[in-house]
Image (tube, rainbow, N blue to C red):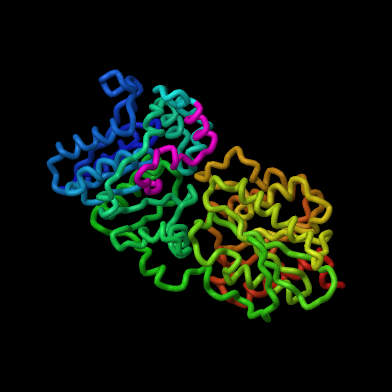
Amino acid sequence: MTAFILVAGAHTGGWVWRDVAAGLTDAGAQAYAVTLTGMDGEDSGNGGGRPAELETHIDELVRLIDQVGERDVVLVGHCYGIHPVRGAADRRPERIARIVHVEVGIPQDGDPALKLVPDQTVRERVLRLSTGGGGGTLPAPAVEDWQRWGSVTGLSAEALARLTERAVAQPLGTFTKPLRLSGAAAELPTTGVLCTANGSSIAVVEALVGMGDPAFQALADPRVTFFDLDTGRWPMLSAPRDLVDVLLRAAAGEGHRVAAAVRERPAHLRPFLIDVKERPRERTGRVDLHLPDAAGPRPAVVFVHGGPVPAGARPTPRDWPAFVGYAQYVAGLGAVGVTVDHRLHELTAYGRAADDIAEAIDLVRADPRVDGDRVALWFISAGGLLSADWLAAPPSWLRCVAASYPILAPLPGWGLADSRFRPAAVVRGAGRLPIVLTRVGLERPEIAVTVEEFVSAAADCGAAVEVIDVPLGHHGFETVDPTDASRAAVERAVRSVLGHLGAETD
């Protein structure tokens, strides 16, 4: 018989696993839904007068593992719960058949749980409350604040109310104390349960592995499997039956393995769908200029990649076929194509990436071969959030903003709820600035929602948006879907942007 030890996330206890535990028991497994010390709403200490910390919870799980009589133990961690799970597994690896991460990353040795908290406001509050090194707690979220922790998609009004009513304050030491690992847990079979409505998916994992950063190669280990669930961050409440099925299959060694997929050429490194003539290319710092044959100052199109792109990814985005292809294509039509490596290496770095783009634009506009009063900005994928600053208050030299399969509002699990990077909220400031939006019909639902939000907001304020649809196109269609329809969409978008720059009439 398999024993599942279910460890809840921040502000919650074993009660969140009620339906999952019942389903596992009905399937013939043993389920232990754990409420850790300080998470019952009655006692924030460990019985000895000291506030509960991460080590308190690790010790509790170790004792439970030692008491479990079943041969195979599967440790399941959600949100904060993965930290004590991995800590306990590291100390009792011989007892653990598998670790399951439910919508949460893999913490490393020395990482505090705070590192995986998605929302910057929550992180800052924890650090502020922790000043002085004392104990204390982080108050439980109000009903409207759960979105800071992730998507509430799939939660009924009743479930969300119950989550709020039963939530308790979280001991600060559980967030701030580092996780200490020997490396034993890293050798155990692992499964990731990815909730697509929260912005994670198998496709995202494969893209990260395909970037080539050594930090993500462990995800391609054949001992690592993945499942997608079409729900938000709390599947134990929103999709308990589906989660039971996934946990049983994970314990049996099933699940998607990314190793086979990454043996092929990653999607972002496949050829650009249009064969373009090679043009001269010059590199200055993080900026590449793709130069046309035409003499005199020429208009420029600056292409802004998405991400996050790991710092160790090679090649970097300005050398990816799609960006080189776009820049060379516009250079062949008489404009300067510009590609930039900005530093969006993690979701918390949008501000730094915005600074990099502003610096690159200044460099481009100062180049004597560029007409600094005729510039277009073209945002790709998650780079779409970086369009917000330019839409909110367009400078006179900005003649057009383009976006291809963009993300135009922060996804729920990204922790950017209060950020300035919300194009749909600021598009009213764009006035009559031309906006060329390429939309793909086979977009991931959580991204498509942000595009529709933007299109609706733009229509309400009368923004000048041209929508180019690629009905059978996927995210990244320029290297994934080399069809006639895809080529026609790229050609139309490029011609439209250059038309707004006056490049084709010079």
Question: Which residue range is magenta in the image?
Answer: 102-128
Task: List the single residue furthest toward the top.
Answer: 49
Nearest the camera: 281 or 10? Answer: 281
**Does residue 311 appear in the picture of this structure?**
yes
Nearest the camera: 368 or 307? Answer: 368
- Residue 118 in magenta stretch: yes
> In the figure, is residue 21 to the left or right of 295?
left
Residue at x-position 25% and y-position 41%: 88
Task: Count numbered badges in the picture.
Answer: 0
Nearest the camera: 412 or 114? Answer: 114
Task: List the single residue furthest toward the right.
Answer: 506
> In the figure, is residue 274 to the left or right of 200?
right
Q: Residue 482 placed where, x, y %?
A: 58, 75
In this rendering, is residue 473 above or below 275?
above
In this rendering, is residue 213 above or below 110?
below
Q: Residue 231 placed where, x, y %?
A: 44, 47
Residue at x-position 58% and y-position 54%: 343
Question: Which image quadrant is residue 494 in?
Answer: bottom right
Residue at x-position 47% and y-position 62%: 207
- Residue 278 in magenta stretch: no
> In the figure, is residue 243 to the left or right of 397?
left
Residue at x-position 60% and y-position 48%: 350
Q: Residue 183 placed where, x, y %?
A: 28, 50
**Does residue 2 appear in the picture of this structure?**
no
Q: Pick the quarter of the image with the C terminus.
A: bottom right
Q: Residue 319 placed where, x, y %?
A: 58, 69
In this rendering, is residue 403 above or below 429?
below
